[in-house]
Image (cartoon, rainbow, N blue to C red):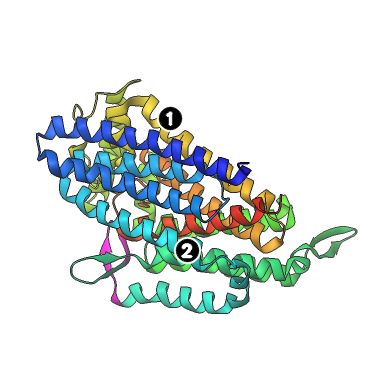
């Protein structure tokens, strides 16, 4: 008799086969457009597809019962990124190919090494120390890219520590909140029967606010600040179910944002480009010109795609600076149209839904908070960059998870996937 876990793994493998066919079709279209080496294109398409399938088959052999939809969703997003990077520049596609293989290795390693992941809650202050060191180091030793000083240069490759720090932040917050849940839910009387969160509850809130402002000031990383603080607020809500904390947190972030707007040119430029006509910034210096030009070209590309797109190779995404990183969603919507853009958004929504499902099915506070935090992290990152390139929010310069070019981001995201899969497995074996 086939168990429910084995059946779900077989369903996962079938979905991965369909995703592999999608990659094959995209690779063939890219080959026709670029007229490149057929053998290289075949290897570039088959190795990642076989890698995803191998992970699923080994999981099936090990009776791993994690959510069967998360891996196929990530495969579709990763394959889309690989196809469009090849279309934009085969050099980036080749490097992304290797990072994807490394990411799959870390995915499998995470699911095997951290089976007893609840023990991770015992090391919260180690996470805080490691995270602080990783954030401080680029301030003194980092190089600036895209307006943010958040990269370490190792010659042949760059590493962005903040991509891994976000995992440490969620681990610390999940550990702290699961241990101090009562503190966060205790109120003190403020005035004539009106109760307000006590002083001890303000500590974590103000601490994360301070960290977000430090990121904004010293690393000029608006995207990371927004994502970290938004993830923190989501986890606070999961821990306490109180909208009051969300309201206070939003107020604090808006206050910090307003102060940053008044004090720092790079924040003011991005906000003004968002609120005003980008054409008005062409005469205000190189930084303002470059950022306004990016946004304008992004909007032109999205508009040119229409409903169904221009087809792979039929657009002009190369006019958008940093199209392979920050603006790859614009390239996708130009050549796959509004329907293609909606499909990408739906994949992220499905990822968020399955991640939150794992959180709701978990049997302890640490697992719930960890799954909710990791899911919020991915969802906020996707929303932040998609909203930035479509001018719904100020441009932030974060990567689109699993799609944008970037080794640090890709490997960190696969580690996050592995942690979510472990939490899902643990919840499902106790059903």
- Please say if 60 is above or below 122: above
Q: In the shown orientation, is residue 224 left or right of residue 192? A: left
Q: Residue furthest top?
A: 307
Disc sitting over residue 85 in the figure:
none
Q: Residue furthest right?
A: 192
Q: For mark 1, does the 10 Å Cα neighbourhood hold few (<14), some (14 to 19), or many (20 or more) residues?
A: few
Give x and y (percent) for residue 119.
Answer: 62, 72
The boundaries of the magenta stretch are 141-150
Q: For mark 2, does the 10 Å Cα neighbourhood hold few (<14), some (14 to 19), or many (20 or more) residues?
A: many
In front: 210, or 312? 312
Q: Residue at point 28% right, 29% down?
A: 334
Give x and y (percent) for residue 151.
Answer: 30, 66
Q: Is residue 409 visible?
A: no
Q: Quadrant of residue 34?
A: top left
In front: 60, or 209? 60
* Mark 2 lies on residue: 110
Q: Residue at point 22% right, 48% down?
A: 93
* Mark 1 lies on residue: 342
Give x and y (percent) for residue 125.
Answer: 57, 78
- Please say if 23 is above or below 168: above
Give x and y (percent) for residue 26.
Answer: 26, 33
Separation of marks 2 and 1 at Cα, in angstroms: 31 Å
Q: Is residue 39 on the magenta stretch?
A: no
- Please say if 48 is above or below 129: above
Q: Is residue 79 visible?
A: yes
Quarter of the image with the N terminus in it:
top right
In front: 221, or 185? 185
């Amino acid at each position: 008799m086939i168990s429910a876990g084995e059946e779900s793994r077989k369903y996962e493998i079938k979905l991965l086969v369909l995703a592999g066919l999608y990659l094959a079709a995209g690779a063939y279209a890219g080959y026709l457009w670029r007229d490149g080496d057929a053998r290289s294109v075949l290897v570039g398409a088959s190795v990642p597809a076989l890698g995803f399938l191998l992970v699923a088959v080994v999981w099936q052999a090990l009776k791993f019962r994690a959510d069967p939809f998360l891996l196929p969703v990530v495969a579709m997003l990763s394959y889309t990124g690989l196809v469009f990077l090849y279309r934009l520049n085969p050099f980036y596609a080749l490097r992304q190919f290797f990072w994807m293989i490394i990411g799959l290795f870390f995915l499998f390693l995470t699911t095997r090494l951290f089976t007893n992941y609840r023990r991770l809650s015992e090391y919260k202050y180690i996470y805080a120390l490691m995270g602080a060191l990783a954030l401080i180091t680029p301030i003194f030793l980092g190089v600036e890219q895209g307006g943010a000083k958040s990269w370490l240069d190792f010659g042949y490759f760059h590493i962005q520590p903040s991509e891994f720090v976000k995992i440490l932040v969620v681990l610390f917050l999940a550990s702290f909140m699961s241990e101090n849940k009562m503190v966060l839910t205790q109120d003190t009387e403020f005035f004539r029967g009106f109760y307000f969160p006590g002083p001890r509850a303000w500590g974590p809130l103000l601490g994360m606010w301070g960290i977000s402002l430090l990121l904004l000031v010293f690393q000029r990383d608006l995207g990371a600040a927004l994502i970290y603080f938004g993830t923190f607020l989501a986890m606070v809500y999961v821990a306490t179910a109180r909208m009051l904390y969300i309201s206070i947190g939003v107020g604090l972030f808006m206050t910090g944002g307003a102060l940053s707007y008044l004090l720092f040119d790079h924040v003011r430029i991005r906000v003004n480009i968002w609120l005003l006509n980008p054409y008005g910034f062409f005469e205000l210096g190189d930084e303002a010109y470059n950022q306004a030009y990016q946004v304008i070209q992004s909007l032109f590309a999205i508009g040119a795609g229409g409903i169904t797109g221009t087809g792979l190779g039929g657009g002009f995404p190369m006019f958008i600076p940093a199209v392979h990183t920050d603006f790859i969603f614009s390239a996708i919507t130009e050549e796959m149209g509004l329907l293609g853009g909606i499909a990408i958004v739906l994949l992220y929504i499905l990822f968020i839904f399955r991640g939150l499902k794992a959180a709701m099915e978990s049997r302890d506070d640490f697992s719930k908070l960890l799954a909710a935090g990791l899911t919020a992290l991915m969802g906020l990152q996707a929303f932040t960059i998609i909203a930035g390139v479509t001018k719904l929010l100020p441009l932030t310069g974060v990567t689109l998870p699993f799609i944008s070019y970037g080794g640090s981001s890709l490997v960190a995201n696969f580690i996050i996937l592995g942690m979510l899969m472990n939490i899902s497995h643990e919840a499902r074996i106790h059903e």
